[in-house]
Each structure stands twice: as C-alpha cells, then as structure tokens.
Image: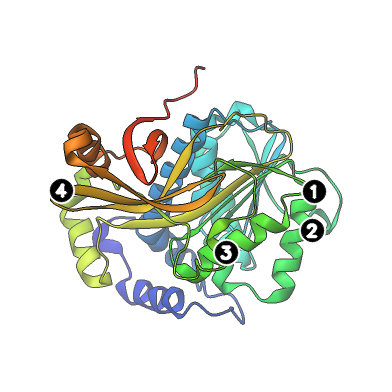
C-alpha cells in the first residue's frame, strides 16, 4: 500500500474507535484494506514504541527463551513481527497470532509468513487458546482499554501458561496504572525485567502518588519529518509525530538480571535554566530529584538530548543528583 492508496475515511473511523477507549462490542476491522492502511500508519507508530521497548530489553540483557510466541489481540501483527525481527526468527519455534477479528488474524498471519518464510506462523485455534500447551513468550499490545472483563480473564489464563510476557500500552494515565496493577498481581510468579529496577509493588499506585503514572517516550525515526506522506498523515490525524508515549511491562519467570542500584526515570525530565528535574523510580519508591547545572551541566544536557531509555545509576546527595551513568547494553 502507498500513501495515495490510503483509505482516509477508514483511518478516521479507526482513530475515533481508538480515542473512544471503550470495550469493543465486536470487531472494528472491516477489511484487509483497513488493516493495510492501519499497519502503514497507526501500526507503524506502535512499531516505533515496540522498538523502544525492545531496545530497553536488549540493554537490560534480556532475551526470550524460545518456544512459541503468541501475539494475542494481534491487530495487523506489528508487535509480533517487530519482536521476531529483533531477536531473529531462529530464536523461536513458531509465531502464533490471534485476534477477535478473523480478518485481522488472517492479515497478521499472512504478513508474518511473508516476512519470515522459514518460521512456522500459525493462527491460534480455540483449542490452543483454551488448552495448556506452554507459551514461550506472550506478546500483548494496545488492547487494555478495549477489553471486557471476560477477555482480561482469558489473558490471565494465558499468562499462567507463559514463561515470559511483554505487554505494551499507550502512555496514558488510565491504561498505565491498570497495567501496573496487573504487574503487581503477577509478582508472585514472575521476575520483573523492565521498566522497573525492583520487584516491589508499583510505587505509582501507592498512597499520595495518584497524579503519577509510569510512562516513557520513544523516538520516531528522524526521516519521517521530511516525508510528505507522514507529514500529511500527522496533520489529518491530528497527531504530533514527535511524541510517542508508551507504558509497558516485561516479566520472566526465570529472569536473573541484576538491577541493583539502578533507577528508571518516569516520563520526561523537565528542563529549567538552572537545573533539570525528574521523577525517579527505584526500590525505595518515587522521588522528585534535581540535577543542578552548576553541579553537572553535561548530565543535564544528556538528559535533554538522549534517545536511550532513561536507566541510570546515580550518585546523590539527598534529592540532588551529583552525577549519573546510563546503563550500557549488556555484553553479548
């Protein structure tokens, strides 16, 4: 599909559905053309969020254990394809896709089969979804605000079969806090890989932190701002192409990474003339910290410009950061 072939009316209908943020009473995909238009536009933006999530997992030193990947609620299948691209199709036995819309399941299946001809790509059957076959990695993307209670119970059943889970959502308050509650629900059975640097209950959900939510920002590829198709899409859809807020959680039953002493910055740091202020999350909870430019101008500049996940090891004097070093990618 090209920009001239896009069905803008279909994209506007989908956009209204997404902004509604209400549980679906039925599939909203009308055709494969709907899915192709979505995959090229809204889906690609979700892909950029997954790029940021997967980069953070890579920096943390995490990798999937193999087995089957289940992309549940797959839509066009962008999340499952992104993940297989990063870790390689040889890592997995199969990629299984499922959506409440058969049209979407078929689209995701065919797109992945074309992209990974050597990988077994399967459409989940009702028997697979209700069975007890182990799942190596459960992938879920941008579904939480659409789920009726019964569907969330289905996910809980799938999580119980999974060795690892990576779940990404929009970076809005309601879905982020709901995802944090699910994270806490599964702490007994899983280790937390990211974004947390601890396995304590989510401090964002604690008393006094009601105004906060755990979210981060991805960086879209720079070339899109010189691409007339993307510029037109952003204008017609009313989207700021520069902003990619997301929330996520990655869980693994067997994770043994060492996050001791690390902190994760929530949201974006705020930059003022004499200092930078940020919301810090670590094993001690949430704290608003500052970096004075007179103490460390280079760190203030780095926090303003870096596109890396904001995972740091700080040297602090109370609530003042004296210095900090970003977590570097784990050795292969």
Q: Estimate the spatial distance between the alpha carbons at disc 2 and disc 4, rounded to whole Å.
A: 51 Å
Residue position marked by numbered label 3 in the rendering: 205
Q: Is residue 213 above or below residue 221?
A: below
Q: Nearer the viewer, mark 4 or mark 3?
A: 4
Residue position marked by numbered label 2 in the rendering: 157
In this view, which residue lies farthest toward the right? Answer: 132
Q: Estimate the spatial distance between the alpha carbons at disc 2 and disc 1, rounded to whole Å.
A: 7 Å
Question: Residue visible at 56% across and 57% down?
Answer: 203
In this view, which residue lies farthest toward the front? Answer: 318
Residue position marked by numbered label 4 in the rendering: 274
Question: Residue visible at 75% across and 64% down?
Answer: 154
Q: Nearer the viewer, mark 2 or mark 4?
A: 4
Q: Nearer the viewer, mark 3 or mark 1?
A: 3
Q: Estimate the spatial distance between the alpha carbons at disc 3 and disc 2, rounded to whole Å.
A: 24 Å
- What crowding class fits label 2: few (fewer than 14 Cα within 10 Å), some (14-19), or many (20 or more)? some
Percent position of residue 316, x then y: 38, 37
Label 1 or label 4, whichever comes before in sequence order: 1
Percent position of residue 22, x then y: 54, 80
Q: Secondary structure at mark 4?
A: loop
Between residues 168 and 75, which one lies in front from this camera angle? 168
Label 3 or label 2, whichever comes before in sequence order: 2
């Amino acid at each position: 599909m090209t920009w001239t072939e896009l069905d803008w009316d279909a994209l506007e209908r989908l956009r209204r559905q997404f902004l509604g943020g209400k549980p679906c009473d039925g599939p909203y995909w009308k055709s494969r053309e709907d899915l192709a238009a979505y995959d090229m536009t809204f889906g690609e933006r979700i892909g950029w969020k997954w790029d940021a999530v997967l980069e953070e997992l890579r920096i943390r030193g995490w990798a999937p254990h193999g087995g089957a990947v289940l992309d549940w609620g797959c839509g066009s299948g962008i999340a499952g394809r992104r993940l297989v691209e990063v870790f390689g199709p040889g890592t997995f036995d199969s990629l299984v896709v499922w959506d409440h819309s058969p049209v979407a399941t078929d689209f995701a299946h065919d797109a992945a089969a074309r992209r990974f001809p050597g990988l077994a790509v399967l459409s989940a059957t009702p028997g697979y979804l209700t069975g007890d076959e182990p799942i190596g990695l459960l992938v879920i993307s941008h579904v939480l605000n659409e789920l009726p209670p019964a569907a969330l119970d289905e996910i809980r059943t799938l999580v119980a079969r999974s060795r690892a889970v990576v779940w990404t959502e929009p970076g809005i308050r309601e879905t982020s806090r709901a995802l944090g509650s699910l994270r806490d629900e599964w702490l007994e059975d899983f280790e937390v890989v990211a974004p947390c640097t601890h396995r304590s209950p989510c401090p964002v959900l604690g008393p006094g932190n009601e105004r906060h939510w755990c979210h981060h920002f991805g960086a879209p590829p720079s070339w899109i701002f010189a691409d007339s198709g993307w510029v037109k899409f952003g204008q017609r859809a009313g989207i700021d192409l520069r902003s990619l807020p997301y929330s996520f959680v990655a869980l693994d039953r067997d994770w043994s990474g060492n996050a001791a002493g690390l902190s994760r910055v929530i949201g974006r740091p705020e930059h003022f003339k004499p200092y930078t202020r940020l919301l810090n999350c670590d094993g001690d909870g949430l704290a608003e910290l500052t970096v004075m430019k007179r103490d460390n101008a280079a760190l203030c500049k780095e926090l303003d410009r870096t596109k890396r996940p904001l995972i740091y090891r700080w040297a602090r004097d109370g609530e003042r950061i004296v210095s900090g070093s970003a977590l570097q990618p784990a050795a292969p």
